[in-house]
Image (tube, helix red, strand yellow):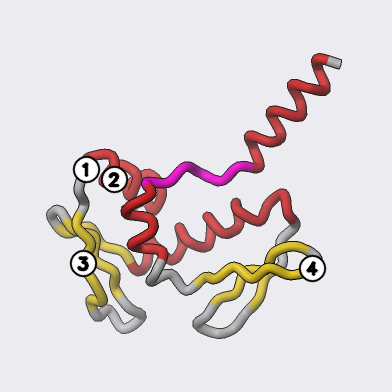
Amino acid sequence: MFAFFVMGVLSMQRAMPDAKEERIYKAIKVYMPYKVEKRMGGLTLIDTRDGRKEKPDAASFYHRLDELEKEWGKQHLRVVNNDVVVVGDNNQSIVKIFIQTQQEREWLHKFFGI
């Protein structure tokens, strides 16, 4: 019985998405092209650039969302001094977001690889 409990807890931990720095993630999230749509059978990821929809299973939904956001971030985010610059598809600067703490800078490097 204890083994089943431990296995359940471990599988729940694996299904959880990566932790995020709340302030900077919310500021960047506004410019990400991925939206979540609730449906009867679960959740759907929508790419607002081309309308493409993905319907991953419930266990891997947030992991897939993280993968897409990381891909987008590597192409569209730049760290310049103490700012994160969001860059559009044509390499034009859209907005600068100030990095307030060292933890935010480390999270940007860890999550997006920038």
User: Disc 3 to disc 1, how far (Cα)?
Assistant: 15 Å
Query: Which residue is found at the position 29% from the left and 45% from the top?
Result: 104
Judge depth for marks 3 and 4 and give the one in front: 4
Q: Residue at x 66, y 42 (%)?
A: 15
The residue labelled by disc 4 is 40
Q: Is residue 13 left or right of residue 106?
A: right
Secondary element under disc 2, as helix, strand or loop, is helix
Q: Position of residue 65 (x, y in %)?
A: 56, 59
Q: Of label 2 and label 3, which has the lower sequence position?
A: 3
CA separation, marks 2 and 3? 14 Å
Residue for badge 2: 104
Per the rendered image, the range of residues in magenta is 16-21
Percent of width and height locating residue 50: 55, 85
Which SS type dominates the magenta stretch? Answer: loop
- Crowding around mark 2 (Cα neighbors within 10 Å: few <14, some 14 to 19, many 20+) is some
SS at circle 4: loop
Question: Of callouts 3 and 4, which one flags the residue occurring earlier in the amino acid sequence?
Answer: 4
